[in-house]
Image (cartoon, helix red, strand yellow):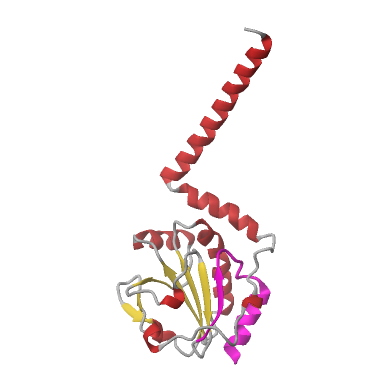
Amino acid sequence: MTSTEKNKTSDWKRSLIKWSVIGAVIALLYFTGWHTEVLGTLQRGMLWTGLFDADTSQVTTTDGPVLTSQDYQFELLQTNGSRTTLSEFKGNVIFLNVWASWCPPCVAEMPTIESLYNKVSDNEHIRFVLLSMDQEPQKAVQFMKSKKFDMPYYFPSSELPTKFQSQYLPTTYVISKEGKVIYKKEGIADYSAPVFMQWIEELAQK
């Protein structure tokens, strides 16, 4: 075997070992469930760049869908086992976030929602509905407890209204006091951005 052939064989072996290690790490993260947290942490770093600040230019004031009385009957299951409906929040600005504990971008943006909640939740006209789509609710409960998030979160207990159905997680909606969906964001965003906080507070004052 020539020296060139030996070098090629050595390079091939190194590549095989490298990709085997990478594959083993990915498999370990997946089977232990750590991949969500790791990917979420990486995506959270992307939020720090400011490129993903919640953009209020997406606000629709004239042609946004309006919730019907049937939409307001959407039933929410609380963590204590009791049920309520979206109508409990009618007449207030509703920040509604559809998420899941297994969704990395959901995990990444959740601290920004917590920051928004801590800043504006004293306003009685702003209500938060974090709607978990976890098939095993206990996983969402464990996630929220592990992060010590105080935000109110629920589970769907009836069919999700079509106005809140999306192919993406997370998806966030802001509903005006009049029941109009004036903001919809599919994908990750930073809701702790000052411009968004100011906007939602001004919206609650109208």
Residue 163: x and y, percent?
Answer: 45, 77
Residue 12: x and y, percent?
Answer: 59, 22
Along the horizontal axis of the image, is 82 left or right of 8?
Answer: left
Seen as rendered, the residue at the extreme top is 1
Seen as rendered, the residue at the extreme left is 81
Q: Quadrant of residue 197?
A: bottom right
Along the horizontal axis of the image, is 32 left or right of 198?
Answer: left
Along the horizontal axis of the image, is 82 left or right of 114?
Answer: left
How many numbered callouts? 0
Q: What stretch is highlighted in magenta?
A: 180-206
In this view, 169 is above or below 71: above
Which residue appears at 65% of the width and 73% of the height? 55
Which residue appears at 47% of the width and 71% of the height? 151
Which residue appears at 48% of the width and 86% of the height? 66
Residue 149: x and y, percent?
Answer: 48, 66
Q: Quadrant of residue 28?
A: top left
Most foreground residue, 87 or 59: 59
Q: In which quarter of the image is residue 89?
A: bottom left
201 drawn magenta: yes
